Image (tube, grey):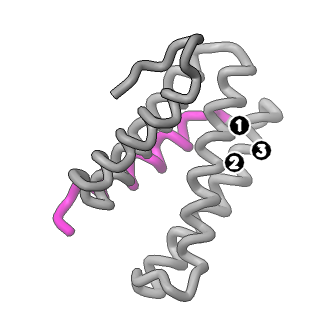
Amino acid sequence: MFLHTEENPRSAGLSVQTYQKAQSATEAPRQTEYRLFAEVTRALIEADKSDYAAKARAVNWNRRLWLALQADCASEVNQLSDDVRAGIISLAIWVDKHSRKVLRHEAELIPLVEVNRSIMDGLSGPS
């Protein structure tokens, strides 16, 4: 695997592709989802102690994660039960509304962290 350097910017794409292939071959979907939630949640926690720009980046990353979950749950091919899908969609709507409040300085960021942690707890439990 090549390291990304200024002299070889194409190698970055190759490295990412190689990593993604290895990751998908060795990691179950729940593990991938847990890892992504952990990364986003860590960014939210760190951003809460930082400036507005860092907070906005982390909140928007979290919103994109929840928007993707919402779209997946709205898909007819999603195999989760209707109740679980509805619950995730409801949470995604709440996350979006609360995120807008956080970005307008009308709400704290911590409830977003708490929701993500609850999802992580569910992902780490028995399947």
Rendered location of residue 95, percent (x, y): 63, 53
Disc 2, SS = helix
Density class for disc 1 (Cα within 10 Å; few <14, some 14-19, many ≥20) is few
Question: Does residue 66 appear left or right of residue 1 in this picture?
Answer: right
Chain part drawn in magenta: 108-127
Q: Amino acid at mark 1?
A: Ala
Q: Are marks 3 and 2 in contact (CB under 8 Å)?
A: yes
Q: Residue at x 62, y 14 (%)?
A: 50
In the rendered image, the quadrant that contains the C terminus is bottom left
> Which dot, 1 or 2, sits closer to the camera?
2
Residue at the spot of label 3: 100
Q: Are marks 1 and 2 in contact (CB under 8 Å)?
A: yes
Distance Cα–Cα, label 1 vs label 3: 9 Å
Q: Residue at x 57, y 51 (%)?
A: 65
Rendered location of residue 17, percent (x, y): 44, 43
> Which dot, 1 or 3, sits closer to the camera?
3
Q: What mark, if any, has residue 84 been given in the picture?
A: none
How would you classify the magenta stretch by its main secondary structure? Answer: helix
Q: Residue at x 32, y 61 (%)?
A: 29
Disc 1, SS = loop
